């Protein structure tokens, strides 16, 4: 199972919006509405931010939103804040009943 | 409060073995599916293994199949990962992660335990 494809880095200024893409195949992203997004700060464990493409867990800011079109999912963060600076990973359930992660995207808040 | 606490990491020589543990609390462990996910230094997340709530269904990533064994003891609220024939490329922080009750997402993660394979 090959890793999902994410851009290595994205950046934005405070208050702006950014979008991170996550491209897979019909065997993972395109085949299921089981795409998740995780935020990871340095030295910390990943934190769930979006599940099932577009759902936010309790306590996650509504500045975070998710969507999917075909084999590509996207995470949008609006109203960028300094604390949003972190690594972001997408993940998808697969046709093999396993999971696959993206390579990760480093978000820099300028 | 849901808590997952990994232990058992350390330095091991290539070809050696190590057993990781994940102690769960704050939820009915026997009702939840569990996974191991690892992260090599400076690299991304990699799914390693899955076990169903009863332990009857297990899956592995190709990179560890035949060398790693996942198991659980629901009476002890614990998840395990037996790692044999370790290689340098197995060096990583290993996280245990809970599968959400509904859906295919990891809703809680432990803090991780570092495994270093080196001579």
Image (cartoon, helix red, strand yellow):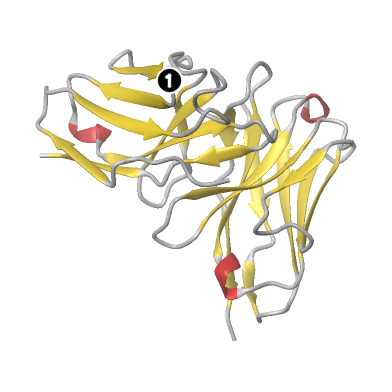
Decide if residue A46 is on the left or right side of residue A9.
Answer: right
Decide if residue A53 is on the left or right side of residue B100.
Answer: left
Residue at point 44%, 63% (across, down)? B41
Query: What residue did someone put label 1 on?
Result: A70
- Quarter of the image containing the N terminus of chain B? top right
Residue at point 39%, 41% (across, down)? A5
Name the foreground residue: B89 vs B114. B89
Residue B63 place in picture, x, y as percent: 65, 59
Residue lying furthest bottom in this view?
Answer: B119
Residue at point 39%, 17% (across, down)? A69
Vertical order, A73 against B49 (above or below): above
- Quarter of the image containing the C terminus of chain B? bottom right
Residue A73 place in picture, x, y as percent: 39, 25
Q: Quadrant of residue B104?
A: top right
Vertical order, A91 against B118 (above or below): above
Q: Quadrant of residue B58?
A: top right
Assess disc 1: are there few (<14), some (14-19) or many (≥20) residues with their C-alpha within 10 Å of its C-alpha: few
Residue at point 70%, 33% (across, down)? A97
Vertical order, B26 against B15 (above or below): above
């Amino acid at each position: 199972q090959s890793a999902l494809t994410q851009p290595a880095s994205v950046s934005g200024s405070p208050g702006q919006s950014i979008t991170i893409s996550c491209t897979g195949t019909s065997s993972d992203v395109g085949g299921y509405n089981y795409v998740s997004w995780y935020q990871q700060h340095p030295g910390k464990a990943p934190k769930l931010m979006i599940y099932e493409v577009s759902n936010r867990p309790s306590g996650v800011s509504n500045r975070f939103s998710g969507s999917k079109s075909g084999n590509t999912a996207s995470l949008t963060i609006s109203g960028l804040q300094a604390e949003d600076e972190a690594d972001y990973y997408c993940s998808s359930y697969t046709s093999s009943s396993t999971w696959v992660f993206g390579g990760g995207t480093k978000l820099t808040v300028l | 409060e849901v808590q997952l606490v990994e232990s058992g990491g350390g330095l091991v020589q290539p070809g050696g073995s190590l057993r990781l543990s994940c102690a769960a609390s704050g939820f009915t462990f026997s009702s939840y599916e569990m996974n191991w996910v690892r992260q090599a230094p400076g690299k991304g997340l990699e799914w390693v293994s899955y076990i169903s709530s009863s332990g009857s269904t297990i899956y592995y990533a190709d990179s560890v199949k035949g060398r790693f064994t996942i198991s659980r003891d629901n009476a002890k609220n614990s998840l395990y990962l037996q790692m044999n024939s370790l290689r340098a490329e197995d060096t990583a922080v290993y996280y245990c992660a809970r599968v959400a009750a509904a859906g295919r997402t990891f809703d809680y993660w432990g803090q991780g335990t570092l495994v270093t394979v080196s001579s």
